[in-house]
Structure formats: structure tokens, C-alpha cells
Image (cartoon, helix red, strand yellow):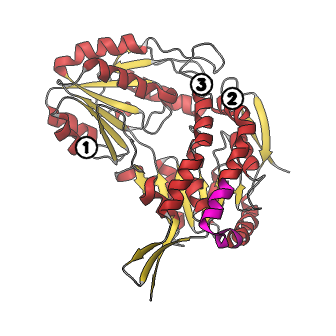
Amino acid sequence: MPTLTSYDAINRSPLGDVPLTEPLQMQAVVLRAKKAQKYWSALPLEVRQQKVVQAYERLISVEDQLALLISKEMGKDHRRAKYEVAGTIQNVKYFTQEIAQALTSESIGHETKMQYRPLGVVAVISPWNYPLAMANNLLLPALIAGNSVVLKPSEETPLVADLFIKTLNQLLPENVLQVVHGDAETGKALVNADINMVAFTGSLGAGKHIMASAASGLKRLVMELGGNDPLIVMASADIDKAVQFAVASSFENTGQMCTSTERIYVDERIADEFEHKVVAFASRYQAGAWDEGNVNIGPIVNPKQHAKVLSQLKDAHAKGAAFLLGSHHYELPFIQPTVVTGITPDMLLEQDETFGPIVAISRFNVLSEAIDRANASPYGLGAVVFGGSDANNVAEQMEAGMVAINQGAGGPGPWVGAKQSGFGFHGTAAGHRQFSQLRIISK
């Protein structure tokens, strides 16, 4: 049987294998999902919720193993890996209650009801940077809604997904939740199969291919397609708080996060102080393996991504950027904490999503120019403004799905991107309902 090998993010040594799902096998996978979905959707909503919660309780027995696999497969420091696993397990009761409440039928007047019915088979295609949490955020509302789910995880983190799904399937009905492993060809076969919806988190390019493939069947889509999040630091900002946020957001998860701060525009009047403090704060971060002491920046997930980050740094260096910390030369698998200033619109660091621990700074004299540069991107996931009361007006002008003032973007609302960062959204009642078909029953 063909297999897919998982590799250690530090030394690229093999960690283990999972069965490879070849494109020709996808039809059988989906047929099993369709059959299981009929039984699953016939169960009352509260029964589906209870069965899912019971299945998730089994994850406690493999909690440490899941965290270890996250650290090994994608390099995340062990504290963050354990937090990702614990959060997934601990939040399931509240999360499923919220989903069930959102999907409960509603009365309109005396004779009409709104019902949230299952769609059928939902394909969940999840990324490697949060291999458990991202998959969980999409498959839970799909399952509670009465759909069957086929999960296609990233080929970078197959062992995490395999253990996750196998553990849940100890209690879930057979074939209600399946996992398929492979590269982009496996993903394409799943999208092209006779499914009803695709829930995807990943790159803009892959999202465009999915959208085109789904068009012929008018398949429902929920897609989060990454970001290039700007931060505007106004002269009225609390500089120390802005510095701490700028560095922490740029370096979180080794910068391998869709809402990482990737472009910083700072008022010229405070720029010297801001940059000095950024360098001092960033210097406290330490890159290394997940099991090395106080490490808080891990490896870049694979050589291809490492080369991409280096290409952006070399491009910035060639076009005149100044490196206040770090350089544009790093050996595999790490990118050390790096602070670059003098970023210009023609640099790749400003144009593209980076996914590396880089603080990229540009100065501005006129606030409107900073806003224009912040908005001059096809991406529009998150945006942040640090400033006084005048920050409210700036935030209103930001072209992003999630905008925050003096804090990180996201908050308690839906996870939503504007422009080419998103199509549909998930989270909260409105997001949960996107995994269902609204039906009106009138008497």
C-alpha cells in the first residue's frame, strides 16, 4: 500500500507513515461518507452533540502524544503545542453547545419555521501551522449540523491528523468522519468528488483553484486564504505596548500564522524610539528546537518555506532595507529573530505573506499615506491600529475583515477575511450556520 511519510521539522528524519489516499480511491471514500451521513443526520441534534462530546473526551488519553507530534511535525515549541491540544479538548463542550444553539430551528410568527438542515458531505482541508485547532474549528460545526466529514490535512502534519481522527472514531459512528492523506493531487480529487461543501484554510493560490473546481457543482465554500496584516503605529500610541504587540505578533508561532503582523507603518516622529525598543524586545526571543530550554521561535516548517522567507529577506536587502537585528543569510531550519526597517512598496516583504519571524518596519510622515499602503494589498484578513482616541477613525478606514485597536485582531466575533483573504467565514452563530442549508417550513 502506498504511504505518505512525515518528517521531523528540525532534522528532516522520518517520523512515521500514513496510508496514502490516491485520487482513484476518493469515489469510494465519498460513497462511504454519503451512506454514513444518512444515519447521522437522522439523529436528533442534541444526540449528535452528545456523541461528539463523548468522542472528544477520548482525546484526553492521547493529549500528550498529540502535543509531541505537533512539536515534531511542524516544530512548534512544546508549550504552545500543549496549549493547542488542551484548548481543543477543554473548549469542546462550550463550542458544541454554541453550534447546537445556532442550528436549532426558529419560529417566525405562528405558522413558519426556519430550519438548519445538513448539506451532505463536507470536505475539510486544513493547514499545518495549527494542525489540530484549524481542523477542529471547521469539522465540529460540520458534524453537529448533521454532515459527514472527510478531512484532508496538510501533508506536513499527517500524524497529528491521523491520531486525532482515529481517536474520535473510537466512538463516532463508522465513516461519519474520515481522513484522507496526500498532497495537492489528493486535495483536488476530494474537491472534484461528489461532495456538497469545501471548508478550506490555506494559500490564496490553492483557494482560487478550489473555487474554480467547485463552480461546476455549485458546491458551498468557506475559505480562509491567509493574510498580509498591517499595523499602523500612530504618534499618539503607547509606544511600549505597541512595541510588545508588534514583536509578539510578528514572532508568534515563528511568524507562521495567518494573522501575524507582517507590515508595520510607524509615524516618523516616534520611529527612532519605536525601532530601538523593538530591537531590544526582539533580542529576548530565542530560536531553537521545541525541547531546548526557553525556546519561543521554532524552525520553519520545511526547506521550501525556509527558502521563501530567505528570498524575501534577500530582496529587501538588495533594495536597500536596513537590518537592525539578524540578517538575510540563515541556515536550515531556522530563521533567527529579524528586524528590518526601510521597507518600501516594491519589496516582497510588503507585497507577500511571509510566514517567518520578521518584524518589517516602514516610516510615514502623512497618516493618509500609511492607510493607503496598509490597504494596498489583495489580502484583507486582519489589521491593527495603535494610537489614542484618533485611532478609531483610522480603524474605520482599514480594509480588513477583522480590525483591532490597541490589541490583536480576531476577538470574540467570527473569523472573517475581506478582499482575497476570505470567502465566507466561520465562528459564532452566523458562521456555524454556513455548514447547513436554511429551510423554511410554512403551514
Structural crowding at the residue carrying mark 1, measured as other residues with C-alpha within 10 Å and reported as few (<14), some (14–19) or many (≥20):
many
- Secondary element type, mark 3: helix
Pointer 2 residue: 72
The type of residue carrying mark 3 is: Arg
Image position of 393 (left or right of 319): left
10 Å neighbourhood of mark 3: few (<14), some, or many (≥20)? some
**Residue found at x 54% / y 29%:** 307
Q: Which residue is mark 1?
A: 398
Q: Amino acid at mark 2?
A: Lys
Report the residue at 59% width, 61% height from top: 144
Q: Nearer the viewer, residue 430 or 357?
A: 430
Residue identifier under label 3: 79
| Relative depth, front residue between 318 and 265 | 265
**Marks 1/3: CA–CA distance:** 34 Å
Q: Residue furthest bottom?
A: 443
Work out how far the residue at label 1 is from the one at label 2, CA to CA, in angstroms.
38 Å
